[in-house]
Image (cartoon, helix red, strand yellow):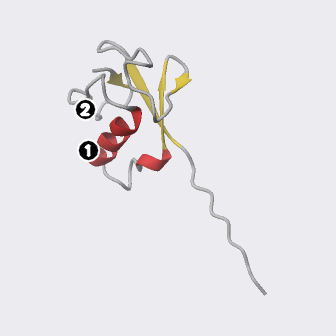
Amino acid sequence: MPRVLRSDLDMHGFNCGLQVIAVKKQIEESQGKDAFPCSQQLLIHQGKVLKDDTTMDDNKVSENGFLVVMLTKVHLIIMWIV
């Protein structure tokens, strides 16, 4: 499976036939929900953000490739009702 730029992420258990969302969930489980929440992850391969409903094969992610895992910021909107 592809390498990830962060050295402590173990990618050996990932299957290239998995959907991107399944890989995100595996990263969340292995690294912790607080550190890598699935909903905030962006997986990037060859400069392209991978869509959740596609597979790793669809995106041509190979065993010798690598993924970049980025986290998006959470924006809180607070509304006051008077």
Q: Secondary structure at mark 1?
A: helix
Q: Position of residue 18 (x, y in %)?
A: 31, 29
* Kind of residue at badge 2: Asp
Toward the bottom, the furthest residue is 82
Residues under numbered marks 2 and 1 in contact, where contact means CB atoms less than 8 Å apart: yes
The residues bearing labels 2 and 1 have C-alpha atoms spaced at a distance of 8 Å
Q: Which mark is residue 30?
A: 1
Image quarter where the C terminus lies is: bottom right
Q: Specify few, some or many for label 1: CA neighbours under 10 Å numbering under 14, 14-19, or 20 or more.
A: few
For the point 27% across and 21% down, the residue is 1
The picture quadrant where one finds residue 6 is: top left
Which mark, residue 5? none
Q: Residue furthest left?
A: 13
Q: Which residue is mark 2?
A: 10
Q: Residue visible at 40% across and 33% down?
A: 20
Which is nearer the N-term, disc 2 or disc 1? 2
The amino acid type found where label 1 is placed reads Ser
Residue 45: where, in percent of width, then height?
A: 47, 21
Residue 46 location in percent, x, y? Answer: 50, 16
